[in-house]
Amino acid sequence: METPILFIQGEQDSERLLEGFQRLREAAPQHRFEKLAGANHTFGTVHPFDGTTDELEQAIALTGEFFSGLLGRDCEGIS
């Protein structure tokens, strides 16, 4: 696939999901892969949503950077 893709994975996720992340990384090295230290599958959030976490904020920042690069502009502060 040539469409740019960002994969964000928490390092504290289940072994099965970490394995899948690694397999994707090996199969599609042209995409961007990020692991967040201390994060789990939900980036530390709970259901029902009870507020943000540092891990979720990091994932949001990485996503913003990814799209900023694709759009060729600074998206900081856009909400």
Image (cartoon, rainbow, N blue to C red):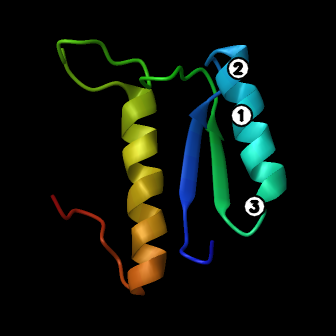
Which residue is denoted by mark 1 in the rendering? 20
Q: Is residue 39 left or right of residue 76?
A: right
For marks 3 and 2 on the same chain, the one whose residue lies earlier in the sequence: 2
Q: Residue at x 57, y 49 (%)?
A: 7
Which label number is shown at residue 28?
3
Disc number for residue 16: 2
Query: Given the image, on which type of amino acid does mark 3 rest?
Result: Ala
- Disc 1 marks a residue whose amino acid type is Gly
**Is residue 45 or residue 4 the one in the foreground?**
4
> How many badges with numbers are in the image?
3
Q: Quadrant of the C terminus?
A: bottom left
Amino acid type at mark 2: Arg
Q: Position of residue 72 (x, y in %)?
A: 42, 87
Mark 3, secondary structure of its residue: loop
Q: Residue at x 48, y 77 (%)?
A: 69
Tag 3: Cα neighbours inside 10 Å, few (<14), some, or many (≥20)?
Answer: some
* Residue 65 pos. (x, y %): 45, 64
Q: CA distance from mark 3 to mark 2?
A: 18 Å
Mark toward the start of the polypeptide (3 vs 1): 1
Residue at image location 70% in from the left, 20% down from the top = 16
Point out which mark residue 2 bears: none
Q: Nearer the viewer, residue 28 or 73?
A: 28
Residue drawn where x is 19% and y is 64% of the image: 78
Crowding at dot 2, Cα within 10 Å, few <14 / some 14-19 / many 20+, comes out as few
Secondary structure category for the residue under label 2: helix
Are the residues tagged 2 and 1 within 8 Å (C-beta)?
yes
- The image position of residue 64, as x and y in percent, is 38, 61
